[in-house]
Amino acid sequence: MTPNLQTLHIKQLKLTLAGDTLLAMHRDIAPGEVLTVMGPSGSGKSTLLAYLAGFLSPAFQAQGELYLGDKRLDTLPAEHRGIGLLFQDPMLFPHLSVGGNLHFGLPRRARDKNAQVAKALEQIGLAGFETRDPATLSGGQQSRVALMRLLLSRPRAVLLDEPFSKLDTALRQEMRALVFGQLREAGLPTLLVTHDEADAAAAGGPIVVLE
Amino acid sequence: MKPRATLAAAVATVMLSLALPVAAAPAPGDWDAVLDAAEGQTVYWNAWAGEERTNAYISWVAEQVDALYGVELVHVKLGDTSEAVSRVLAEKQAGNDDQGSVDMIWINGENFAAMKANELLFGPWADSLPNYALTDPDNTPAVRYDWTIPVDGLESPWSSSQVVFYYDTALVEDHPDNMPALLEWAAQHPGEFTYPQVPNFLGNAFITQALLELSDTTDLFYKPMQEEDFDAATAPLWEFLDQLHPHLWRSGRAFPSNSADLRSLMSDSEISIALSFSTTEASGAIANYELPKTVRSYVHDSGMIGNMSFMAIPYNAQHKAGAMVVANYLMSPEAQAEKQDPAVWGSNTVLSMKMLSPDERALFDGIDLGIATLPPDELGEVLGQPHPSWVDAIVEAWQERYVN
Amino acid sequence: MVLLPAFGYLPVLGGNTFHLEAWQDLWARAGLGHSVWLSYASGLITTLVALFIVVLFLAASQGTWIDRTIRRMVSPLLAIPHAAVAFGLAFLIAPSGLLVRWVSPGLTGWERPPDLLIINDPSGLALMAGLILKEVPFLLLMSLAALPQLRPDSRVVLARSLGYAPGIAWLKCVFPALYPLIRLPVYAVIAYATSVVDMALILGPTLPPTLSVSILNWFNDPDLSRRFMASAGAVLQLGVTLAALLSWWIGEQAVKCLSQRWLTNGARSSGSTAIAVGGRALLITVTLLAISALFGLALFSVAGFWRFPDALPGTFTLDHWQRILPSVATPLINTLSVGLTATLIACVLVVATLEHAARHHLAARRVQWLLYLPLIVPQVAFLFGLVVAAESIAIRPQHALVVATHLLFVIPYLYLSLSEAYRRLDPRWGQVALSLGVSPWRAFWQVRLPLLLAPLLTACAVSLAVSIGQYLPTLLLGGGRVPTITTEAVAMASGGNRRLVAVLALLQALLPFIGFSLALLIPRFVWAKRRQMRGAA
């Protein structure tokens, strides 16, 4: 989908809170690769995500740099980084329709918006759902819409924040396959934060364990 | 005058006129100049607005002065006159000495005394108004003394009023004619009489009336109070009130807050006798559906307290000329006759009939006073308001005595 | 400006030196202690009772149509001006009031009203009843605006699955999370109730009146030197309000400690029937009282003469309406233009502040207490200073000055109505939007604002009602040049013609009523097809 695939470089990162070091990291994530970050609560996983996405609270200090290819990201505001996010909850905007949520993801100057949205819905087996209220969708359906919304926004890297933890077991398998399949196909560098060993296994990439 | 001083004065005058686009008010004595200056002015008249008939009358006045003099009159509706006093006070504090927002105030008694004492009033001007002579000031002390305070031309007379009692003839057979009789009646009809809580002006009027009626000699009440006279002079009053209160509405444990509350109690048959500072209150309230048609007015044999209310102009009013023109119009026979008509408002005139031409007098003769209003010859003697120092002192003592 | 005269400084009245005479005069006032106690106690008691009623109802409320109907009936009650409620209530419960009329002389045999001290009773019970009638809708509305974000349904479902009765489940699992969200509104209610003037004038004790009414009387006293004492009284009033707030805060801490055991003691259903019945019954009582009061007003506005003990006026007439209506066009327009302008400005300022805080992860600052100062200092005291200030910089009374003064009162209410909802909005909504590549501006317009539409509209309706209710600020700062429906109504109320007062009170209630109705209806209309967005309605 995206012609020029690039590597995400996390360089000499050190996150501190009031002088205490929370975590340090120096990693590259190649296009299509999923880096899994595991660790107990309080190990700084969510702080790492906030840093990468550009939402770090001013209470924390960050040293180090973040690059996508040779473009420096850590100095950019969140909306210019091109880093997409998936949370535990699908976070479909309740005030927009399913189609509206997907449109929201599309870049402003994208062509054939309606066609792209229709195609995305078709891909996840929800063809014709454009005008539906997200609240009327099942949990699995919502997660799939959220994934497509993310992909339609053409991110250049993706962060996954325990995206499967709220799904039941059967659905979880299916979503893992769908998410990782799509991300790999798009060739996006991905960072996954999870508690679940099975997530890590399904992701198939390197694993970092925080303490 | 030394040349330098003249120069300075000239410079000051020029600077002053530069600073003030609105020319200072013309001398009140030069009436043509006043009329000229008034034309095109907007006069903000701050007046208590609790009575719809009063407000309607003021609207009528506004139409008249617009047509006659080109003065635009705006009624600033107040719940309490002191709100306008506050405004003037704040302006003076802030040094706004010539562009005040209050042009004219409906005022009397204590508010007048306070504004006069604190030099918040413009004047003298009132005795220069062309219509002032119609009040026959030489023979009418009420025009020259507001609660014994010399008016000194700082306010122009507008309305005269007198306390009257009113009662429901369907509930009361014989109304009392004096304070001791009222006490006796109240003892026989517990809970059926009350008066507004002091320091409401009608409440004050009631205890003042009692003070005057129960005292053998009343001369000293019309001079500033001497501390040493107070206890002896007011002893009969307290004896009377101490006896009266247990028989009052709610046994004197609560009082209505003003004459309107009192009227409502009458309307609800909670009480059978009430009082008012307007001789036409009962007729007006009947017309307003507030009182039953069986209500009538009466006065005590010894006469009832009365006073006048006035127009005053704050020292810093921006439109003094306009205010004077309006105040003068308010004293005109047409405006006073219109005001006296109970169908309009029913507020008594301040003009002296003998000063009017036959045509002008005819305006008043034709007025139907209303079913529950006493004709002028039955209103009895008008007792003057005592000196404010006496009223202040008995009001203070009342609160000490009856507020726990 | 309040402080200086309290210590003897007000040059225009000859007070050029600082001294404590005003305070000595104040302490020497007959009944001062009782006045202070009345203000303090009525503030605390009414807030406690109102909160109790609201909490009990919410606990009992199961989302059935009855509960929804009750809720819908309560919110518009907020629109009725305080004075109108007081006036209506007085006519309802007075010995010559509507209730007695309806049962007399049939049941009671009374041909004349009994001589009972109900209104203006020395212990202030009538005043408290009136305050509760106004506080319940306010606290209920604030709670309903805050609730959806707590997902109360899933909490209750969870607790019920553990065997808790519904009411108990709500009290143990939802209320502890809800209280922090409505804490500021509760404090505002305490501050308001300790310093209320208009209701206390109509319903409160008179021998002596509450402190706030005494202060007003002293400020209005023709004897201008009383103003020194009045200013000292205003400082004392501030102290009383703060003392009431402090007492409440101590009470909060105590309840927090003591309730820990109750929350976790495992009792699952004791008292649940009482909650289910009591919660609904109390709120219905409040609602019926308020509606009857309103009904009384409506009756009076078309009443001819109405003798006791007739249940209805002997004759009906449209006279009163016909006399008032021709003159209310300008006041209505002024009311609306001032109210809307103030609300709009306040809305922009408050939302900008909150959005700024949200973007930069700023916590609430202590300075914000300054914002609430206008709510706890008696108006009559500091408005004088405000007029002096405006005059000193040569700003003459005008429309804009009135709007600016209204902002002092509108902003705090808007802020306290909106800030919790704004702050508690899941930050991930904004993060998702930004990570999809939209600008912060678009994320604000297209995500945050629509998500907050319901609380925003509610907050605006509250603000509009606050602006509409302002009397002294409008009169003093406007120099009488900006007549509003409220200045007309208060001026008319001083004359006490109940029929005309009723007409004006109903007119005065009309605009806020429209505001609240719109705040309720717009989200329901806009989100007709969005199930999750209708949670609040």
Image (cartoon, coloured by chain):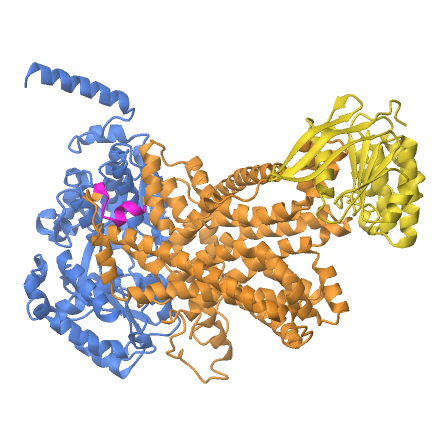
Chain colours: A yellow, B blue, C orange
Along the line of sight, which residue is nearer the eye, B296 or C508?
C508
Examine the structure image and report whether residue C9 is included in the region drawn in magenta. yes
Examine the structure image and report whether residue B254 is included in the region drawn in magenta. no
Residue C305's spot in the image, x, y percent? 43, 67
Along the line of sight, which residue is nearer the eye, A11 or B190?
A11
- Indicate the quadrant where residue B374 lies: bottom left
Quadrant of image for the N terminus of chain A: top right
Q: Which residue is drawn at 81% across and 47% down?
A: A133
Along the line of sight, which residue is nearer the eye, B312 or B381?
B312
Quadrant of image for the C terminus of chain A: top right
Q: Residue at x 41, y 73 (%)?
A: C118
Residue C278's spot in the image, x, y percent? 61, 73
The residue segment tinted magenta is C2-12
Q: Is residue C310 above or below residue C477?
A: below
Q: Residue at x 12, y 54 (%)?
A: B148
Tell whether B277 sits left or right of A87. left
Q: In this view, does C59 lie above or below C330?
A: below
